Image (tube, rainbow, N blue to C red):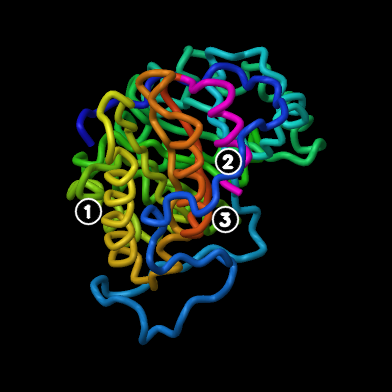
Amino acid sequence: MARHREPGTPPRPLVVLAGLGLAAVTGLAIWFLPAQATPDWSAPGPSHAARVSAAPSPSPAPSAAEPVPSGFVAFVDTARTPRLDLAQALRRTGVRWFSLGRLMAGPGGCEPTWAGGLAPGRTPFAGRVAGLRAAGGQAGLLFGGPDGREAAAACADQAALTSAYREVIGAYGAPFVEFEVRDSADLPAVRRRATAVAALQREGDLLVTYSVPLGPEGLAPADLEMLRQTTAKGARLTTVNLLTAIESQAAGEGRMRRVASSLKAAHRQVAEVFQVDSAAAWRRMALTSVLAGPDDLSALDARKLTLFAERAGMAWRSARGVPPSAQVARVLWGGGA
């Protein structure tokens, strides 16, 4: 990546899905596809003997019966778009999965609040999630991000932290949560978060994603150590979401190649950390494009990214930062086919 961009600003409210007027592109970007991609990401992987060997024991995979996010997961900043009707957004766009954020540490440290300062129950989204589910969609919660501290970093009381997570997740009936981790070097916070996640997963099914920046060489050493520490505490991470800063089109040829190279480096790291085979490692990964400008992605770039994610068997994809054009958004929502 030529420059780093933080995923600070949310996408604008979802625009009305119009007909996708892009022509089919035959044989698009064959170089961009991973060598060992598999489209059937629900199929079991090879035997244990075929797996890479680094960590002492494999991290358990989520059950196939669990409601795993797939396709495009729309990030919604509830503080900045409080009037967004989730069920209506689903009907207009076809997007079924939503991640509601951002939940940050409140003034007391141990009680998460929305980034705008509201308590979790004091937002109109609490009443709209039921409507979304009735329409066939699903919503999870996003903790953390660039604007403030996540509760695990601010709350040193393990029991209070676990209770706070439990209360918020229960209030929304969230089947999945995402932690956008910015404190991986703070090992006490990493361990408190992992201990809380493990406790909640022992109480019932909960899918958990950790979102971390993707660099030219894959994941940073501190983020890799965080994943190891987290699994050592017994937490089951369904997905590692890679926040991928997209270079501007002014960077010229090779931008998407560099993204592909970074993703392949992260794939090797994920396989090693979780002790899984190549196909299972791709299934543990999600791709979130982070845009600093609305023109960072062209429709063709978006098609390449979605084709890569789909052919590799990555769990899901998303977008953050400055919203792309409506045409590019439709490609991201609809996939690369």
Q: Quickly name the residue at label 3.
A: 203
Left or right, 161 with respect to 257, comes to right
Judged by its main secondary structure, the magenta piece is helix
- Label 1–label 3 contact, CB within 8 A: no
Camera-side residue: 214 or 272? Answer: 214
Residue at the extreme right of the image, as rendered: 134
Q: Quickly name the residue at label 2.
A: 72
Image quadrant occupied by the N terminus: top left
Q: Work out whether 175 lies above or below 250.
A: below
Q: Secondary structure at mark 2?
A: loop
Q: Quadrant of residue 330?
A: top right
- Which residue type does callout 2 highlight? Phe
Q: Work out whether 122 lies above or below 299.
A: above
Q: Position of residue 249 (x, y in %)?
A: 33, 26
Q: Quickly name the residue at label 1.
A: 225
Which residue does the image show at 60% across and 18% down from the upper left?
Answer: 13
Q: Is residue 194 magenta?
A: no
